[in-house]
Image (cartoon, coloured by chain):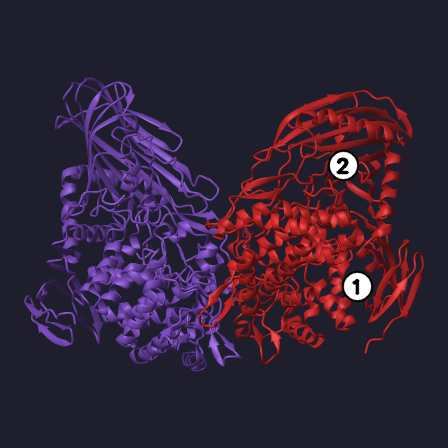
Chain colours: A purple, B red
Amino acid sequence: MKQYFKVDEWKVIEEGFDPAHNKVAESVFSLGNGRMGGRANFEEAYSGDTLQGNYVAGVYYPDKTRVGWWKNGYPEYFAKVLNAANWIGIDISLNGEQLDLAKCKVLGFRRELNMQEGYLKRNFRARTATGKEVEVEAIRFNSLVDDETGAICYSINPLNFGGYIKLTPFVDGDVVNKDANYDEKFWDEVAKNTWDDGAVLQMRTRKTGFEVATGMKYHVALDGQAKRIDTQPVTREKYVGAEIRMNIEEGQRITLYKYAANLSSQNHPKEDLVELTKNVLDAVCHKGFDTMLAEQAAAWAEKWKHNDIVIEGDAAAQQGIRFNIFQLNQTYTGEDDRLNIGPKGFTGEKYGGSTYWDTEAYCVPFYLATAEQKVARNLLLYRYKQLGKAIDNARLLGFNNGAALYPMVTMDGTECHNEWEITFEEIHRNGAIAYAIFNYVRYTGDEQYLADYGLEVLIAISRFWAQRVNWSAQRQQYVMLGVTGPNEYENNVNNNWYTSTIAVWCLKYTLKVIDDVKRLDTGKYNSLTSKINFQDEQECGKFKDIISKLYLPYDDNLQIFLQQDGYLDKEQTLVKDLPETDRPLVQKWSWDRILRSPFIKQADVLQGLYFFEDDYDVETIRRNYDFYEPRTVHESSLSPCVHSIIAAKLGDIDRAYEFYLRTSRLDIDDYNNDTEDGCHITSMAGTWMSVVQGFGGMRIKDGALSFSPLLPAGWEAFSFRIGFRGISLKVLVSKNEILIKNQSNQTLTVNVYDNGYLISPSSETAVPIKPLH
Amino acid sequence: MKQYFKVDEWKVIEEGFDPAHNKVAESVFSLGNGRMGGRANFEEAYSGDTLQGNYVAGVYYPDKTRVGWWKNGYPEYFAKVLNAANWIGIDISLNGEQLDLAKCKVLGFRRELNMQEGYLKRNFRARTATGKEVEVEAIRFNSLVDDETGAICYSINPLNFGGYIKLTPFVDGDVVNKDANYDEKFWDEVAKNTWDDGAVLQMRTRKTGFEVATGMKYHVALDGQAKRIDTQPVTREKYVGAEIRMNIEEGQRITLYKYAANLSSQNHPKEDLVELTKNVLDAVCHKGFDTMLAEQAAAWAEKWKHNDIVIEGDAAAQQGIRFNIFQLNQTYTGEDDRLNIGPKGFTGEKYGGSTYWDTEAYCVPFYLATAEQKVARNLLLYRYKQLGKAIDNARLLGFNNGAALYPMVTMDGTECHNEWEITFEEIHRNGAIAYAIFNYVRYTGDEQYLADYGLEVLIAISRFWAQRVNWSAQRQQYVMLGVTGPNEYENNVNNNWYTSTIAVWCLKYTLKVIDDVKRLDTGKYNSLTSKINFQDEQECGKFKDIISKLYLPYDDNLQIFLQQDGYLDKEQTLVKDLPETDRPLVQKWSWDRILRSPFIKQADVLQGLYFFEDDYDVETIRRNYDFYEPRTVHESSLSPCVHSIIAAKLGDIDRAYEFYLRTSRLDIDDYNNDTEDGCHITSMAGTWMSVVQGFGGMRIKDGALSFSPLLPAGWEAFSFRIGFRGISLKVLVSKNEILIKNQSNQTLTVNVYDNGYLISPSSETAVPIKPLH
């Protein structure tokens, strides 16, 4: 479905209605505000193919695990992202005939996502089975300002008939998860309450006991004039609605304003939820739809001011990157350290859990550069708070002495994954969590974080690595057996280079941070070591021994790092020799064939070279890139961005651009035929990295920003805005120069290529672009 | 629960009733006749803890697969052994009070399995909640002679009251599988029919459409005198019963004779099932219970004549081996080449499917030596008939050109397993299937089988191996990547020695059989190669190339075969150093820890040395045994027997005996705390092998039997009976000699140790036992 949506620099546009694309459109047009969000389902009834989805951040259900064969260490329950009460619904009846686009002749249809101002607008003209023609406009948004609310302005215009139109705005809590293991329902009703111009439904999740009150309030206008209405409440189990009947004439226009609020017991006392929801509804209703929408546009403008990327000369690339940034901002605002960034955000329920290593490896760099420091810090604190559960998780697997294994997937710190080859073996996630601490401190300079929180996490992770390796008497080295690397097309391998490399790095970094914290705050250091019973000398001794003696596979002949033991025993065919019909392998080949093939799902050795590029010379990186790139099928959305950044570093701008395109329009163009399940939210941060770290060549070195920019051939110029240690700057890369604008009142020190520049407050510096050799 | 049952040479006896042991007893006392069977559930109601189980051979249900994450190549459905209509039920009401041992005070209880004559007898005395005391005796068997029937003689004696006793014999088709993936019911009712002294219920399985008519017929005696009765039919959905009311006096004895029949649409036209079931019931009822029981005893005597093992001086060992032989004979009679030997037989529903590589590796040798030739031949034909599905299965995984991968678990040839590390990787099963052909021909001399069926299977299996290896440019050898060996405590390893060794053996054996069949029957050979498009020269060339260049891991230092690449990188701890509290590992350790440990679930390298012992000198076998045995935890019931046989070969009689004990009383003593799920039927054949091949040292060499016996220290003597190429012989090993009786009218040639002996018809030869060095 290439280019189903229209290209526009600030919008995603659907022209004409194609039911076959509806679920993809529902994903792409999803709305969220970090607190609540949902798919772009229709307000009115739709009996065609749809995936209904409304989500409340942090509200989950521990679905009973479904496995073929239970293995000790598996979690019994599996946190599912929960489909919550539908608050967008407005049932429309035209002289008794239900409006349902699946049963109409659709005469015109347009849906657009306005990313600049943060709303969704839908217009259509349709003829019902009995010939009634209506024109509808629906505008909807989830408010960034009042982040427990959403609002809808829904107008109907009967074109060729008059009579009774009945509008039934409702809240429906009788929803199911498509992705439920045993087709259970997850919500019970607690209370409902209806009044003249609104209603609240309070629901409780089974097992977890989260309570969410979802309320609505509404008013009506006729041809733009507010109109008093009589409503008739309609309630049933898990449902509150209100029938609004109006006798109108052909050509008149009824507009229903529906305000909704979702209040969760995570943030409010359960017993007050109904009352508080009413209050919130009263407040936004009083503010009114137009004011809310204006505030929404202003809030989005403020976001864009800090994180927009402008690409000149390539509208598709421009649309792609803005869509990625827009979705990231819709998914996570960083206000709440209990929340995280699900791989589908508020766009679908697939995968379960909200937190993968994607957060640390991909999202933290994005939020570090584009949001206040507290946002990335909250992402780190999320893991800090779950350290106890990570220690429990490791204990379940047989580790002790405070060793921590963070879960592969989680909602509240408990492991939610149950394939042994992932759950037990894809342990490099622990490394990404340590790396994020390093990355945060490198970017922000906030060393106090290490003393307060970071070191405790680092020691627990290092203790895990120290127990996870074992001494090979045969090799006279430590080895790391039975792991799964980032390349999940290999399972249970020995000595995955990436995993072992990041383990060594974690141990080294922990030792460094121990020294730093000791120096910085001896008292805190001592109280920490006593709290966690850290045997300083002995444990550090063990860490050092492993650092010096951990086996890291290397092939002398090819002079490359070996992805794992035995990788070169595989038949060394290349991706270019694969018939197009065999791809994607995960859909076309048996798992058996995939596992035994040399093909790499996503950056693995290259992920390590990306993280630790300063430890390797360019020729080493090039040799490994030249070897592994042709074997990589990029069947994870997390892969192309890393390849793009490395290609850019190696000066291979054409490949860098090719990889960039794959990632930036992944969902808009539904590259992998899976956008109907939801968008690939976390990989969107990778797209941002491709531009800023790839084409912009942005790095932090010795506490200062540096750039080594490249401009893709088809682009006139591109610019991005970032924040760094209190300084806001804009970087514009054009054909001839890189222009750095210091938009703050501090002096900025930057390196461009290898030279340092001082840029005074509110001024700019231009440096000529180095031509590619 | 060591020694819950009483030791007796011909019986298993339970004295006293312990509800906590009831499910174990239900398994151990199971009855079967190869065609139908079930657990030793009570006839009367029992509201305590029980696993109801009645099974009809070959009737299965394809339950929808349950997996955490679908992988291409998995089967969508999973054949489940089906719990079928309960035909044993007799509801007892004493003046309106239901007899239910869970609600009674049990004053006396005895259950015994008479293995010599093939029936189950239960006596108890119980006092109900209201104080009524009754004495009950129930005798039940599944007829070997009339193999679609079973019979029950159920007597009640009211000890302290008189009045109305109501007996309700019934057939209940409203049963469930405990082991159902989605708690579905698997049976629908087709028809039911009741008449004066009987009833039939016909049920159909969902999806598979098997129909089974289960009928009953009954008569009653009072104090031993036949009594006319009036019955009242009771029917409901999936249930037929008949109420029999009798007004009796204290001390009288009512006896209900209940005959049951199970006729399946596998063997009869669906539309005739009810009528035919009536006919069968009429016939057995006319024969009468006592005659049936006498015929049963005679049929079992005939079985024992051919396969009894007598152990003198060790009653527990005697009981153990007879229990194993008894269960094997109950499970499979070899009459029907559509049937096979489920790992739980008719004793439980766990595991699903009926056929594992256990059949070929363990059961074929037992039936070869103890039953007519056609029995083992039928087991081979079962696989021959499923060759097409094995080829389909391989194609699903990406193989072509007629390569076959037999399923890991199956009912009808379709794969039923869905863990990738087993389904796709535990491919050595293909080798066991080829080995069984070799074993059959070696034992029987039936070379015609090769031309008719065997070669076609061998070529398909060899084609699989030829595609499953790949050329390692680095090693300049073929390698076999991504396999799971018999030791399932390692998954997805490279170059498992056992798998690669059996692959090479298959290729060699296929080449040999090609030569033999070419010579034996050129026409047949040519028509086969043309049928399967076998490119003789080219494909044989490839086979030879792999034979000469497949990498088989070996450690020069230890001079042992390496279980797989990297095995010596593991921490080399030994089983003796494991705390007792850590065992069994599968229950106490996480799967992660098990996988990374050096501990071996079951014979792996040693399985290969057992199969191919002639290819290795004794010192090689000893070095490998000395290395691997201390690392083996024997957490598969299939493991100790192989170790026992190798230990015996190496003259380590004490260890051989120790392993024997582990296998022979596994279920009677519930060693693994899992007998409640059913008995370990297939491993029982391994127990038999431990005695005959281990202590007896029986082998076939150059078409002749050979023995090299050893006597365990505590035994006075042991003897076994076997058949070999039309000759029936008895082998008696005592402290000083081995006595071989030729019970046929042909001359027998045998080797004892290294000398040959000719034994005339109906005569015997004694050879002195060689002392252990």
Q: Quadrant of residue B570?
A: bottom right
What x and y, as percent, mark residue B69? Answer: 46, 50
Callout 1 secondary element: loop
Q: Which residue is mark 2?
A: B43
Residue A413 vertical placement versus A113 (above, below): below
Residue plotted at (56% across, 49% down): B532
Which residue, as the protein is rendered here, is positioned at the far left? A763
The mark lying in front, picked from 2 and 1, is 1
As measured in the structure, the alpha-carbon distance from the residue carrying label 2 to the one carrying label 1 is 44 Å
Residue B608 vertical placement versus A83 (above, below): below
Subunit ID for the residue under disc 1: B
In this view of the protein, which residue sits in the foreground, B662 or A728?
B662
Is residue B21 rendered to the left or right of residue A433? right
What x and y, as percent, mark residue B582? Answer: 61, 66
Q: Which numbered tag is attached to residue B698?
A: 1
User: Is residue B368 at least partly visible in the picture?
Assistant: yes
> Quarter of the image containing the N terminus of chain B?
bottom right
Q: Which numbered tag is attached to residue B575?
A: none
Subunit ID for the residue under disc 2: B
What x and y, as percent, mark residue B471? Answer: 47, 66
Are the residues under badges 2 and 1 in a single subunit?
yes
The amino acid type, in three-letter code, at marker 1 is Met
Residue B581 vertical placement versus A125 (above, below): below
What x and y, as percent, mark residue A288? Answer: 16, 37
The amino acid type, in three-letter code, at marker 2 is Glu
